[in-house]
Image (tube, grey):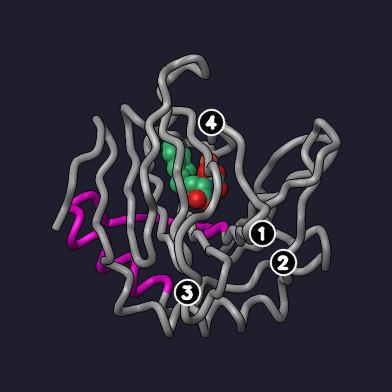
């Protein structure tokens, strides 16, 4: 079923659960060529969430700023291709949400351990902000922070559970958001951690 959480934000609870094993396998596989890393941000801090990417582009950050790159700066090689199961899941999300077809050219893979969080931020490195963003939560539950168009707007806390899918577009696309922390019991595959897949058309 589809829940409307805000103008331009829907949730499809548990939609990715049937894909969980295949997704975990594909993620472990692509990490061989693009391992987890903690990127530096322009402030000089190191992100507490570990990241990797796949697709034609990958999101990277260093002391100079944020950008999408066709190569992994850590290896100099192209990012791993988007695994077939990622594409299959996206097709399924498009059908169920009514917001497809999606033209995602990148998937950012975030890994949170119990210490990790993501401060309130906006995502605006993508070329065309008209394309929806799709997020898939795997593993332990997270407290997701959902704000408004201004940093000072009130922030709601949403619980993102294993297999939950969210789709953002238009009116929500530039809203501030973040991840406060993980919560709840460990997960059979991901243990005390959480993985989030974010699909975008960045180029
Ligand atoms: C809302 N990731 O990678 S996913 C990010 O759980 C990021 O790893 C969080 O924020 C995570 O940038 C949240 C959901 C998400 C992703 C992009 C958005 C929500 C968004 C862009 C605009 C509005
Ligand atoms: Fe974000």
Report the residue at 61% width, 36% height from top.
119
Closer to the chain start, of discs 4 and 3, is 4
SS assignment at label 1: strand
Report the residue at 55% width, 74% height from top.
191
10 Å crowding of disc 4: few (<14), some (14-19), many (20+): some
SS assignment at label 4: loop
Closer to the chain start, of discs 2 and 4, is 2
Read off the residue under disc 1: 51
User: Alpha carbon of mark 4 to alpha carbon of mark 1: how far?
Assistant: 17 Å
Query: Which mark is nearer the camera, 3 or 2?
Result: 3
SS assignment at label 3: loop
Q: Can residue 143 be seen in this view?
A: yes
Q: Tell me, for residue 122, which label it has, or none.
A: 4
Closer to the chain start, of discs 3 and 2, is 2
Query: Assess mark 4: CB under 8 A from ligand 1?
Result: yes
Boundaries of the magenta span: 86-108
């Amino acid at each position: 079923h589809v829940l409307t959480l805000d103008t331009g934000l829907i949730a499809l609870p548990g939609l990715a659960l049937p894909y969980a094993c295949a997704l975990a396998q594909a993620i472990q596989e692509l990490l061989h060529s693009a391992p987890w890393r903690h990127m530096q941000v322009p402030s000089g801090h190191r992100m507490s969430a570990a990241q990797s990417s796949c697709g034609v582009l990958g999101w990277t950050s260093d002391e100079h700023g944020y950008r999408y790159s066709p190569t992994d700066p850590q290896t100099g090689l192209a990012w791993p291709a988007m695994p077939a199961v990622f594409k299959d899941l996206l097709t399924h999300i498009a059908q169920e949400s009514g917001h497809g077809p999606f033209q995602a050219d990148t998937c950012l893979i975030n890994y949170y351990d119990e210490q990790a969080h993501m401060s309130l931020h906006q995502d605006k490195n993508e070329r065309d902000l008209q394309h929806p963003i799709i997020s898939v939560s795997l593993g332990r539950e997270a407290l997701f922070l959902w704000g408004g168009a201004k940093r000072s707007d009130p922030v709601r806390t949403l619980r993102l559970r294993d297999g939950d899918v969210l789709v953002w577009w238009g009116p929500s696309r530039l809203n501030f958001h973040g991840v406060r922390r993980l919560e709840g019991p460990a997960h059979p595959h991901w243990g005390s951690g959480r993985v989030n897949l974010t699909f975008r058309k960045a180029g």
